[in-house]
């Protein structure tokens, strides 16, 4: 690196050596800590041990003190708590401002945020206020053995490759991580740590007013990340109607439906059912990929599926290289055939049971 | 109470199958047609709907090489009044911090505005960073995933409804503000030939360089980007059986597949 650094005039100079600790922003929703935050505590623990530093958890809101020890049980050494009536309602700019104030005071080396919808809204604001870079949807973290630099890793779009991303001249290193990328560590009440209560004198005027929270009434559906059987559709279905067949098959097998990014982009299936690097990572016993070509990002999301079944009209679709069992053909013929055979088998079974 | 609205758009490759040059780590964009990021068209539609209802203006902004002019022409064809392309060699290689800085400078230079609207995320990098970062640079209130926005009678607050994983939230937000629109909230209107012709006649698209924007070159492009790609490696491939049914009878195929899955104890039928 050049000795005379030409840095952006908007950046206050920093000395990276002063920055210690791996921080996790702990998101509280409805009185509970979001699982995505717990998962990050486990990964932060691993990185902190490698760098011989501490794991810090930041937990802010109002009436959240009773949750303050919780991050310790999942791997945190220090928990920074701001329990303040002004934080009763969530405003992204206000919450971001408070987290920034803590980060400026304690200078963490890294700050990780769970990639929930609120987390993805909040994290870039925090990063920008700190004039640091941020990597979205990272999938693993490494420490450079020579320099001790934290490297965030994410697949760039549509390629069988992983980009290693370093943060130059700025701290903290920041990243957001989608839920279920890292496993949830085991809760251990014997773990010891320190709760540090912080007070904030002046907070940002959010210039917003919270009016209403309306829960979305969803049918009792199994979330795709917890399903044992997933029937997933892609662009090859050709229309939203195609998902009706998939739904019938899923129902018959006690599974759920999901979709590729293209199916979501086309509006055929909701965003919370998207499988892949920018959607969800799933771990079913059987994953049916129907009309899904098999872009790298999609394959990434099914890497932990026990068995992948590909049904596609194009014999050269990359999905076949990434499937255990493949059927080349029109899904409009294959899926009804599957439904029919399953029904026959079920009938036979119930018939023989009666005998 | 007219609303002056700024919409951010990105010119993106129209595919997720873009490859990366293993030697340089850069995207191979040759031969891949580009489009306006579809989620940004949803944002444009929201802006035009608000303009239809309350009057005012819609300005689309983008930071990109000159080829992205076609994207601005497209949204002008939808009814956007004005387009501004921040384009300069010095902007190349920007991460989201440096990109949002340039866009914030563009917005500052435009001067008068009530609302900045962004798309949910882009289909190429899907970071969803820029909205929050622009709000941070300009110190504006912001909220993501908006599905509905109503201007209140006072003319300077917007009542927005936004969607989260399991809930809708309603906020009253003081203008000027930044919002992002949840994907698929609206179907973008079609391009109208008359509007496109107007674009050709009136030339409502301007290109602003780093000089026009008075930006410190250390804050733009690669130089203004704290994050850099330090290396590329391959995604480890999960070993799979790769058995493909040989035949063409759908029922035979179904029986073959189900017997495999039952044999492995993965299905109980």
Image (spheres, rainbow, N blue to C red):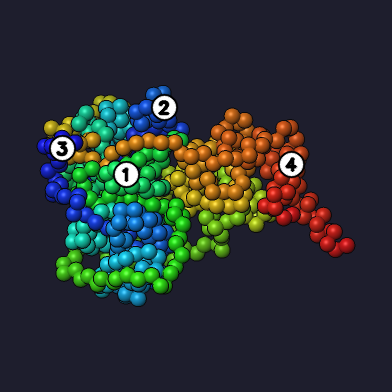
Foreground label between 2 and 4: 4
Which numbered disc covers residue A144? 1
Residues under labels 1 and 2: Cα distance?
35 Å
Badge 1 element:
loop
Residue A138 point in image, percent of width and height: 38, 47
Foreground label between 1 and 2: 1
Residue A317 point in image, percent of width and height: 57, 32
Residues under labels 4 and 3: Cα distance?
62 Å
Q: Which chain is disc 2 placed on?
A: B
Sequence-first disc among 4 and 3: 3
Q: Is residue A93 visible?
A: no
* Residue displayed at 18% across by 54% down: A18
Sequence-first disc among 2 and 4: 2
Which numbered disc covers residue B32? 2
Query: Marks 4 and 2: in contact by CB < 8 Å?
Result: no
The residue identified by callout 4 is: B256
Q: Which chain is disc 1 placed on?
A: A
Query: Marks 1 and 4: in contact by CB < 8 Å?
Result: no
Sort mark 1 into few (<14), some (14-19) or many (20+) by Cα contacts within 10 Å: few
Which numbered disc covers residue A172? none
In depth, the one of A282 and A304 nearer the eye is: A304
* Left or right of A154 on screen, residue A22: left
In depth, the one of B44 and B26 nearer the eye is: B26
* Residue displayed at 45% across by 60% down: A184
The residue identified by callout 3 is: B218
Residue B129 point in image, percent of width and height: 31, 47
* Residue displayed at 71% across by 45% down: B260
Badge 2 element:
loop
């Amino acid at each position: 690196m050049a000795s005379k650094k030409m840095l952006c005039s908007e950046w206050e100079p920093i000395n990276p050596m002063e920055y210690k600790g791996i921080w996790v922003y702990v998101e509280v929703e409805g009185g509970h800590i979001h699982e995505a935050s717990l998962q990050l505590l486990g990964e932060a623990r691993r990185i902190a041990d490698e760098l011989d530093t501490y794991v810090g958890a930041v937990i802010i809101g109002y009436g959240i003190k009773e949750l303050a020890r919780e991050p310790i049980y999942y791997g945190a050494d220090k928990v920074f708590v701001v329990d303040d009536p002004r934080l009763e309602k969530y405003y992204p700019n206000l919450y971001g401002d408070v987290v920034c104030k803590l980060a400026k005071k304690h200078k963490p080396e890294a700050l990780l945020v769970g990639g929930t919808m609120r987390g993805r809204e909040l994290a870039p604001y925090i990063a920008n206020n700190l004039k640091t870079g941020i990597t979205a949807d990272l999938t693993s973290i490494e420490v450079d053995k020579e320099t001790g630099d934290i490297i965030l890793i994410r697949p760039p779009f549509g390629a069988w490759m992983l980009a290693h991303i370093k943060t130059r001249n700025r701290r903290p290193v920041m990243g957001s991580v989608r839920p279920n990328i890292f496993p949830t560590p085991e809760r251990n009440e014997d773990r010891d740590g320190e709760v540090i209560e912080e007070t904030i004198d002046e907070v940002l005027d959010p210039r917003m007013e919270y009016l209403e929270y309306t829960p979305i009434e969803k049918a009792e559906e199994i979330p795709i990340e917890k399903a044992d059987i997933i029937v997933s559709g892609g662009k090859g279905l050709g229309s939203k109607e195609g998902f009706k067949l998939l739904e019938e098959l899923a129902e018959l097998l006690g599974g759920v439906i999901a979709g590729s990014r293209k199916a979501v982009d086309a509006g055929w299936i909701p965003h919370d059912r998207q499988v892949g690097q920018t959607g969800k990572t799933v771990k079913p016993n059987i994953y049916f990929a129907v009309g899904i070509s098999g872009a790298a990002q999609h394959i990434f999301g099914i890497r932990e599926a026990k068995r992948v079944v590909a049904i596609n009209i194009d014999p050269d679709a990359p999905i076949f290289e990434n499937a255990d069992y493949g059927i080349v053909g029109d899904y409009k013929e294959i899926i009804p055939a599957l439904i029919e055979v399953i029904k026959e088998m079920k009938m036979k079974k119930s018939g023989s049971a009666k005998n | 109470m007219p609303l002056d609205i700024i919409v951010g758009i990105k010119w993106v490759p129209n595919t997720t199958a873009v490859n990366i040059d293993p030697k340089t780590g850069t995207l191979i964009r040759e031969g891949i047609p580009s489009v306006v990021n579809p989620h940004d068209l949803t944002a444009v539609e929201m802006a035009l709907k608000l303009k239809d209802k309350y009057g005012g203006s819609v300005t689309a902004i983008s930071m990109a090489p000159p080829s992205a002019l076609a994207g601005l022409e497209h949204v002008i064809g939808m009814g956007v009044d004005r387009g501004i392309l921040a384009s300069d060699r010095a902007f190349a290689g920007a991460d989201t911090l440096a990109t949002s800085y340039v866009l914030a400078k563009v917005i500052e230079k435009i001067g008068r505005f009530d609302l900045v609207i962004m798309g949910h995320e882009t289909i190429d990098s899907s970071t969803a960073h820029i909205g929050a970062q622009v709000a941070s640079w300009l110190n504006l209130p912001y909220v993501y995933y908006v599905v509905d926005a109503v201007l209140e009678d006072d003319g300077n607050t917007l009542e927005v409804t936004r969607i989260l994983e399991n809930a809708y939230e309603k906020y009253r937000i003081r203008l000027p503000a930044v919002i992002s629109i949840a994907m698929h909230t609206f179907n973008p209107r079609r391009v109208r030939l008359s509007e496109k012709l107007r674009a050709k006649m009136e030339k409502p698209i301007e290109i602003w360089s780093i000089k026009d924007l008075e930006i410190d070159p250390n804050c733009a492009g690669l130089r203004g980007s704290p994050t850099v790609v330090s290396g590329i490696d391959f995604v480890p491939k999960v070993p799979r059986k790769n058995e493909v049914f040989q035949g063409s009878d759908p029922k035979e195929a179904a029986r073959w597949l189900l017997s495999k899955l039952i044999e492995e104890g993965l299905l109980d039928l």
